[in-house]
């Protein structure tokens, strides 16, 4: 699934609330990890995820037609959040 929050809506705790709900859902289905991909040039989003317990573990590319955009792969370990 892909989720974007428009820049004009990126305040007031919306992102934190959405992320919290996603993590709660994963915990509720006994998930071990939460994974996501984020555009490598989106410093604001990368910093957000790092502040909320994610670690960058690799990269991949998102393709639209002939264009390829680097995305970082990030992970949160639900069993041991400090990792």
Image (cartoon, helix red, strand yellow):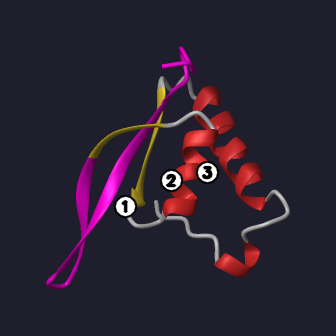
The image position of residue 66, as x and y in percent, is 14, 84
Q: Residue furthest left?
A: 66
Residue identified by numbered label 2: 46
Q: Is residue 66 magenta?
A: yes
- Given residues 24 and 35, the one toward you in this image is 35
Q: Residues within 10 Å of mark 2 (few under 14, many from 20)?
A: many
The image position of residue 23, as x and y in percent, is 63, 37
Q: Is residue 61 left or right of residue 23?
A: left
Tell me, yes or no, whether the two marked residues, 1 and 2, touch with CB atoms within 8 Å.
Answer: yes
Q: Residue at x 66, y 77 (%)?
A: 7
Q: Is residue 67 left or right of residue 33?
A: left
Which range of residues does the magenta coloring cover? 59-83
Per the picture, the main secondary structure of the magenta-coloured stretch is strand
- Given residues 55 and 36, the one toward you in this image is 55
Q: In the rendered view, would you say 61 is above or below 25?
A: below
The image position of residue 56, as x and y in percent, is 39, 40
Q: Residue at x 23, y 55 (%)?
A: 60
Tell me, yes or no, whether the two marked residues, 2 and 3, touch with CB atoms within 8 Å.
Answer: yes
The kind of secondary structure element at disc 1 is loop
- Given residues 21 and 11, the one toward you in this image is 11
Q: Earlier in the sequence, mark 1 or mark 2?
A: 1
**How far separated are the C-alphas under marks 3 and 1?**
13 Å
Residue identified by numbered label 1: 40
Residue identified by numbered label 3: 48
């Amino acid at each position: 699934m892909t989720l974007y929050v428009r820049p004009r809506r990126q305040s007031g705790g919306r992102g934190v609330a959405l992320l919290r709900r996603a993590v709660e859902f994963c915990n509720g289905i006994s998930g071990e990890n939460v994974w996501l991909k984020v555009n490598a040039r989106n410093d604001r989003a990368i910093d957000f995820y790092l502040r909320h317990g994610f670690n960058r573990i690799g990269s991949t590319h998102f393709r639209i037609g002939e264009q390829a955009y680097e995305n970082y792969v990030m992970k949160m370990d639900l069993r041991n959040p400090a990792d």
